[in-house]
Image (cartoon, rainbow, N blue to C red):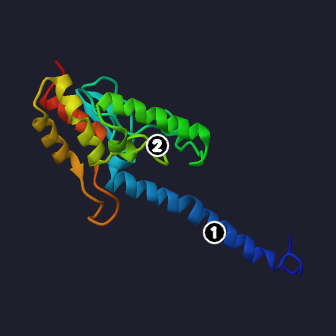
Amino acid sequence: MTTDNPVTRPLLPALRLAGLCLVLLGLAYPALGVLVGQTLFSHQAAGSLIERDGRIVGSEIVGQPFAGSAYFVGRPSAIGYDPMGVGGSNLAPSNPELQAELVERARAYGEREGVALGEIPVDAITASGAGIDPHISPENAGRQVQRVARARGIDAADVEALVSRATEGPTLGLFGQPRVNVLALNLQLDARFPVP
């Protein structure tokens, strides 16, 4: 291919630029991002995993189900807490299937926590957009205190104090709402007040 051809002459600079962009933006930039992430934020880059007694018990950033009345319960998940299938139910608020699901969740929450339907926090019955949100509202955690305290045979004030310490403020003091990481709270409970 010669550069004297009037048809191919304008293509060569475009192909060179495309090749340069591919190398810089498709290879070098992502590799730099991975290197910086692994170097400066190794815990987060590895999935923010939490280890206890030599085994991984969960992640700070991925919700998981908890069974038993001695544990705080996280938000419902439309995807079964599967971090590989992140997503919501995509059902409209007017969808009868979603409405029936919300009514059932509210009934179950009310029975489990001993609260009236009007006292149930919204995040206790609605799944997050990602389906794996590890946090609940302080109000939701507060509604679960009595059940957890009874199941562990401890004073509710002790559990309330743990909830208070586990409550995180808005990110950078500006973004989001106060929240409680359910896994971190349950681990603190097990450390301070083991299940009998």
Q: Which residue is mark 1?
A: 20
Front of the two marks 1 and 2? 2
The one of 92 and 169 positioned closer to us in this rendering: 92
Residue 47 in sight from this viewpoint: no
Q: How many marks?
A: 2
Residue density around tag 1, few if under 14, some if 14–19, many if 20 or more, within 10 Å: few
Quarter holding the C terminus?
A: top left
SS of the residue under disc 1: helix
| Residue drawn at the location 30% of the way across and 43% of the way down | 140
Q: Position of residue 48 (x, y in %)?
A: 34, 44
The kind of residue on which mark 1 rests is Leu
Q: Position of residue 65 (x, y in %)?
A: 38, 31
In the image, residue 6 sits, relative to residue 145, either above or below, namely below
Residue 141 in sight from this viewpoint: yes
| Residue drawn at the location 37% of the way across and 33% of the way down | 109
Q: Position of residue 138 (x, y in %)?
A: 26, 47
